[in-house]
Amino acid sequence: MFSGIIEETGIVEEIEKKPNLCVLKVRAKKVLKDAKLGSSIAVDGVCLTVTAIKKDILSFDIMLETMKKTTLGSVKPKTHVNLERSLKMSDRICGHFVSGHVDAMQSVTKIITGENYTELRISLTKELHKYVVPKGSVALDGVSLTVGDVRQKDFSVYLIPFTLQVTNLGYKKEGSPINIETDILAKYLFAQSRDKSSNPYSFKKDNN
């Protein structure tokens, strides 16, 4: 489990392709502290397991399904990726609960900039639309953000200069792919309401 507060941007050093998976090697600094084999680290919002550590390089195995469904399947050497270590029970939750299980790979449809202002518009599928609501939470490439306007086919998030500086969102262009994970609480609430409507007696107390 993560919070969506990015600790640093790492740099992809190498992508080693193997049958049905690839090994992603990322140069890092902050997340190296207390990292060990088996540690969970979110890379662009995708929960990955550390499989090797060599000096300042972390290695991760990426399965074929992950390569197909997330942006990690198209990263190249020198690409900047967002990194966050998994939460400790004592940590403050400054963002929102992020599982690291990406729902879909979407794209940046439009970037609107102004003085100290950047708006990203992100494409939105019909399947995910029900989980994205104004003022709700969403993770984009692992970054915890607040949803702005929601339209039929896309939605907006607004970025402060600090976010652009400490994450890879400042490198995005129109058409860039981006990982999206909707709010896990929204998913559970929707599932509960769906179950109630399909079975109105499922949550009714039995007094017999």
Image (tube, rainbow, N blue to C red):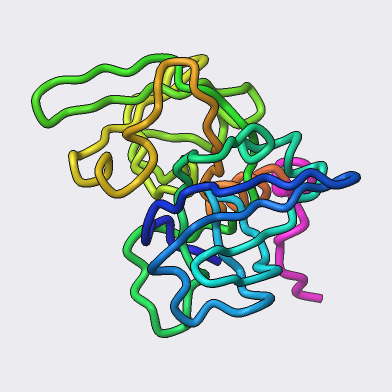
User: Residue at horizontal 85%, vertical 47%?
Assistant: 18
Residue lying farthest to the front in this orientation: 55
Q: Is residue 203 magenta?
A: yes
Q: Up-down: is 180 above or below 83?
A: above
Of 145 and 83, the residue lying toward us: 83
Question: As rendered, which of 189 and 205 lies closer to the eye?
Answer: 189
Residue occupying image coordinates x 46% and y 24%: 122
Q: Is residue 13 left or right of residue 61?
A: left
Whether residue 59 appears in magenta in the rendering, the answer is no
Seen in the image, is 110 located left or right of residue 63? left
Q: Position of residue 17 (x, y in %)?
A: 79, 43
Q: Is residue 5 above or below residue 151?
A: below
Q: Quadrant of residue 61?
A: bottom right
Give the residues in magenta.
195-208
Residue at coordinates 26% horizontally, 17% vertically from top-left? Answer: 112
Q: Main secondary structure of the magenta part?
A: loop
Q: Is residue 110 left or right of residue 158?
A: right
